[in-house]
Amino acid sequence: MTRNIIAILRGITPQEALPACEALMAAGITKIEVPLNSPEPFDSIRQMQVEFGHAAMIGAGTVLTVADVERLAGIGAQMVVSPDCNIAVIAATKGAGMASYPGCFTPTECFTALAAGADGIKIFPSFLVGTKGIQAMRAVLPAQAQVFAVGGIAAEDFGDWLAAGVDGFGMGTAIYTPGMDAHDIRARAAGIVAAYDMAKEAM
């Protein structure tokens, strides 16, 4: 079962990357993002892609420049996530054959991102938009547009966000904080997966 949950491993080190990735996959999460403001992020992404890229979508977050996109393409990354709607970054990402998830906060940014070729929209920070804001945006966005809620989302509220029209979630500190061991990552991830599955079943 493929779940629309992106695990955000902000602050992870290359030494922790493979055990963390394995723990997430064991819990049922196969979309994994290493933000570029983590220590040596390209090394972590490269390791995870080599070891687990056949079974998981491995990529980067906090991607702000075309140069970073090009470097990610060179190490085999599959996904580029950004906090902003940068048309040049989206175009470079798609040109390199990677999935693009730019950050958007307004309907204008959402439509701009989709027109530029984005695979999905990252509503960020979602807690400021709220479920009512998502619902209003969903009324005008294309039905096929994938919408991820990122920022301040609690697992117990998944049902409310799904009902408002989101397709998935980006989860950061709820899954990982720097220094956390693989056992704890798996336990947290398993709890989030269980909440997601329950919310989906209740729809």
Image: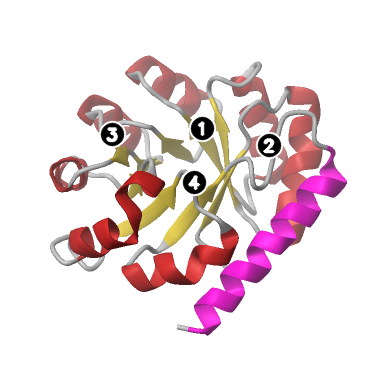
Q: Using the rendered image of the protein, determine whether residue 28 is visible from the camera's viewpoint.
A: no
Would you say the magenta stretch is mainly helix, strand or loop? helix
Please give the residue where the numbered disc 3 appears in the rendered image: 90
Is residue 109 or residue 1 the one in the foreground?
109
Contact between marks 1 and 2 (CB within 8 A): the answer is no
Question: What is the span of residues highlighted in magenta in the rendered image?
Answer: 181-202
Query: How would you rate the neighbour count of disc 2 (Cα within 10 Å): few for under 14, some for 14-19, many for 20 or more?
Result: many
Label 4, label 2: how many angstroms apart (C-alpha)? 26 Å
Is residue 115 or residue 93 the one in the foreground?
115
Residue type marked 2: Met
- The label on residue 60 is 1
Residue type marked 4: Gly
Residue 80, quarter of the rendered image: top left
Please give the residue where the numbered disc 2 appears in the rendered image: 48
Query: How would you rate the neighbour count of disc 4 (Cα within 10 Å): few for under 14, some for 14-19, many for 20 or more?
Result: some
Please say which color scheme the image uses: secondary structure
Query: How would you rate the neighbour count of disc 3 (Cα within 10 Å): few for under 14, some for 14-19, many for 20 or more?
Result: many
- The label on residue 152 is 4
Q: Earlier in the sequence, mark 3 or mark 1?
A: 1
Label 1, label 4: how many angstroms apart (C-alpha)? 20 Å
Residue type marked 1: Ala
Label 2, label 3: how many angstroms apart (C-alpha)? 23 Å
Give x and y (percent) for residue 53. Answer: 63, 45
- For the N terminus, the image quarter is bottom right
Is the residue 2 above or below the residue 200 in the image? Answer: above
Residue 139, quarter of the rendered image: bottom left
Is residue 50 or residue 42 the one in the foreground?
42
